[in-house]
Amino acid sequence: MTILALEFSSEQRSVAVAHGGKVLSEAIATGDRRGTKAFGLIEKVLAEAKIGREEIEAVAVGRGPGSYTGIRAAISVAQGWQLARGVKLLGISSVEALAAQARAEKIFGRVNVVIDAQRCEFYLAGFDISADGFKEVEALKIVPLDEIQSRAATKEIFIGPEITKWVPGGQNTPPHAATLAQLAEHRDDLCGGEKLEPIYLRETSFVKVPAERSGRFER
């Protein structure tokens, strides 16, 4: 299967194309969280791989957590591709991609995957990683900075985008579209565009506007 992968959950945006589990091309751009350069990156990898748009059979998207703007942009591209070409879609946790990358880099043992959640909070998931594979041993959750720092003091292993800002001994590892493409080759949980959603652990909160401010007055 020929797969186009989009990973925009960190400040490093990447796009990759793979066939049969082999990555044919990957393009990376680093910039602010509000820009994606999606179509330029897509055109670059397709040209390098000598693959036409009509040859893409599936689009894999990194669902985060991370940059909500970037993830939404990637999902929008995937949804548009499905509408135009009828391709299959697949959403993959960016945390899972980071665990897969740690394994590829031979980072073995109990590994903490950490992603900045803003507001002095962090997304944290724990994995047991070995040469044979990786398994989640601590479910993804949001934790405060002091928990990250207390764990770092015990010399636990930390990886993630820009992790060294908070854990000097950590390993900076943004998720890569190439990893998404390889993971997607072995997945069968395909979905329609309407079901492709970012991973976002915070509860949505609404503030009720007083009647006098909304233009309605109670009798």
Image (tube, rainbow, N blue to C red):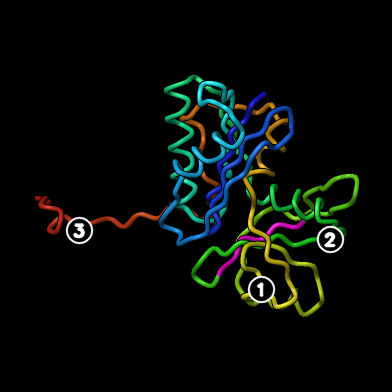
In magenta, the rendered stretch is 121-126
Using residue 35 as the reference point, say whether residue 87 is left or right of it: right
Instruction: For marks 1 and 3, give the one nearer the viewer.
Output: 1
Cα separation between marks 1 and 2 = 18 Å
SS assignment at label 1: helix
Residue at 48 percent of width and 42 percent of height: 74
Residue named by callout 1: 164
Residue 210's tag is 3
Using residue 126 as the reference point, say whether residue 178 is left or right of it: left
Query: Percent position (x, y) of residue 195?
Result: 50, 32
Residue at 81 percent of width and 56 percent of height: 105
Q: Amino acid at mark 2?
A: Arg
Residue 118 versus residue 208: which sits nearer the camera? 118
- Labels 1 and 2 touching (C-beta < 8 A): no
Q: Amino acid at mark 3?
A: Pro
Residue 43 versus residue 158: which sits nearer the camera? 43
Using residue 122 as the reference point, say whether residue 217 is left or right of it: left
Query: Percent position (x, y) of residue 23?
Result: 70, 37
- Labels 1 and 3 touching (C-beta < 8 A): no
Residue 38 versus residue 173: which sits nearer the camera? 38
How packed is label 1: few (under 14 Cα within 10 Å), some, or many (20 or more)?
Answer: some
Residue at 42 percent of width and 22 percent of height: 84
Query: Percent position (x, y) of residue 145?
Result: 61, 74
Please report whichever mark, 2 or 3, sits nearer to the chain's N-terminal start: 2
How packed is label 3: few (under 14 Cα within 10 Å), some, or many (20 or more)?
Answer: few
Asked if the magenta segment contains residue 124, the reply would be: yes
